[in-house]
Amino acid sequence: MAQQGNFKSPSRLGALGEGAPVSSSGSVPGGKPRDGGLKGVDFERRSFLGKIVGGIGAAVAISTLYPVIKYIIPPSETATSVKELVVGKASEVPLKGFKIFQFNKDKILVVNDNGKLTACSAVCTHLGCLVHWDNAQNLIACPCHGAKYKQTGEIISGPQPLPLASFKVRVEGEKLIIAKA
Amino acid sequence: MAENNQNASAGNIPAKPKPAAPGAAKPASPGAAKPTTPVASKPAASTSGVYKPPVDRPDPNPYRDNRVSPLGAWFQERFYAVIPIIDYLKKKEVPKHRLSFWYYFGGLALFFFIIQIVTGLLLLQYYKPTEAAAFASFVFIQKVVPYGWLIRQIHAWSANLMAMMAFIHMFSTFFMKSYRKPRELMWVSGFILLVLTLGFGFTGYLLPWNELAFFATQVGTETPKVLPGGALLVSLLRGGEDVSGETLTRMFSLHVVLLPGLILLLLSLHLTLVQILGTSAPIGYKENGMIKGYEKFFPTFLAKDGIGWIIGFALLVYLAAVYPWGIGVQANALSPAPVGIKPEWYFWAEFQMLKDLKFEGGELVAIILLTIGGLVWAVVPFLDRKASEEQKSPIFTLLGLGVLAFLLINTYRVFAEYGW
């Protein structure tokens, strides 16, 4: 293997010959000073070979990095989305209280306002905190930055840009069913 | 400074003259400046009578005039203290002779270790080290994550190749007697690195949490029980009496925290010693003129090492794609052990020895013999006095051949009985 150093670099040339015995000169035959050996170096051919090696190296690097990048991107979840779902029992939502249920990929806030059930997204549209039902003030509140919503999800005040998405909720016997609006 | 310069505030010169460029000898006394002169040019005694001799400090950065790129110069200015070290390392040379080929295997072991770090980090992104989720996450990596199968197969194959390269490197340095003075600690650190590598293999084997892994760990952690106080050691390894989710947690923490930390420490020591002490030539080669010359480590030998690494990488990808390791069946503590269960190939020789010593207390004898053998092997540089005096030591060559024969024959016997 020939010397791979940059022969054109003055600093590299400066380093040559320092400390190393003359016999230790890579492809240059033993005893021959390095500067003398440079006369026989075909820089054009060397540069061409350098480009070929660099190109192959780049191809190998890309084909190595491609699977790695594909790997670290999490695979998309393939869970099927349903129109409506029995999420639990109606008794799980206390009177004048609330409970958050998972429905497909959404988190749904079900409020029991004196027996009147309403459902809307539980994810604040500001920065994604989960909201709660404030029974004293009769509104939905986000504790993170003070967003306030009506029971139906409409904006009252706060930094949130959008209202909470609403969902349908009904009770069949004991079953609590959430459906897309 | 000002107390020596009564006229400092007079005229239009600054109170504190601009300091000289770093590296240049400082002017003798700024206080000596005349009020009307714009620069402190006269290095004479000040009018106050306090004499300040010229200060001739050594150049803080003797490398600043080196012909390097501006970026290189920027770093040189800040790291000039380590430049002599780099210059020293640049002078490292590798002897060329008919056994030079064997010099590449240490580098290959290092290469496969780097692959292990990278693929291990990638596997950690999806692996869940709990009894309930380990196998499912392992299957998820293999079947769902894009190229997850490739990453896992490369990790598994690279582990085997790393152990293989470490063994080859160890025996080649042994037979070339490279461990002799002054490289004793290189040998000892290398031996500990091999033990840590085997530890990686053992702890990593359980992580897929399949049947094979479960029972291999069951057998492996059961073995020390015959030792005095062995029951405690076994329960320490298992995190309880039996192999369970607790064992998985322990093996996982050892595999990804403790062992990597230890191996990095030892590897730093090993590689630093390699750089400081250089590459050894076999005994008598210099005296008999068998050295064909020397090549620089940077960049010639490293470039050749690189070729070895490329070949190793190609082999690794080929093995991972063509000979994939199985997924197996999820571990179940209440199912019988699968027929033909055996450890990884690098434990086969010891496994066969344990099987051979069937008499009462045979396992204890085997463990004692293996421990003594390992310790003797670790301190060989201190026993082989002849090699340290640059004389041939055929007794130790025979010892090495004996150890190699023991490993190869017993490994082959397991292979002949169980297959791959």
Image (tube, helix red, strand yellow):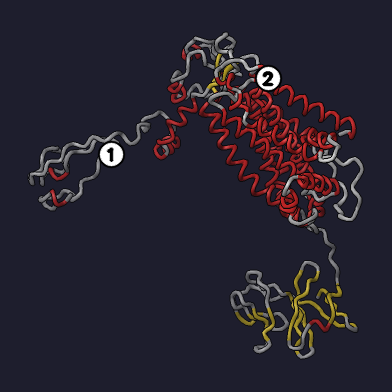
Give the residue at the far front of this rendering: B360
Q: Is residue B29 left or right of residue B102?
A: left
* Chain letter of the residue carrying label 2: B
Whether residue B251 is visible here, answered yes or no, is: no
Q: Looking at the rendered structure, which numbered label has been put on residue B397?
A: 2
Q: Nearer the viewer, residue A165 or B62?
A: B62
> Where does the image place residue B405, in percent across and percent down from the top left?
77, 24
Q: Nearer the viewer, mark 2 or mark 1?
A: 2
> Where does the image place residue B166, in percent across and percent down from the top left?
69, 31
> Where does the image place residue A98, in percent across and percent down from the top left?
74, 82
Q: Look at 13% across and 38% down and name the residue there.
A: B42
The quarter of the displayed image where residue B390 is located: top right
The quarter of the displayed image where residue B259 is located: top right
Q: Is residue B106 left or right of residue B9?
A: right
Q: Nearer the viewer, residue B212 or B67?
A: B212
The residue identified by callout 1 is B21
- Could you say whether the residue bearing mark 1 is in a helix, strand or loop? loop
Whether residue B123 is visible here, answered yes or no, is: yes
Q: Mark 1 Cα within 10 Å, few/some/many (few <14, many 20+)?
A: few
- Could you say whether the residue bearing mark 2 is in a helix, strand or loop? helix
The amino acid type of the residue labelled 1 equals Ala
Rendered-image quadrant of the C terminus of chain B:
top right
Q: Earlier in the sequence, mark 2 or mark 1?
A: 1
Q: Is residue B294 above or below residue A168?
A: above
* Chain letter of the residue carrying label 1: B
Q: Mark 2 Cα within 10 Å, few/some/many (few <14, many 20+)?
A: some
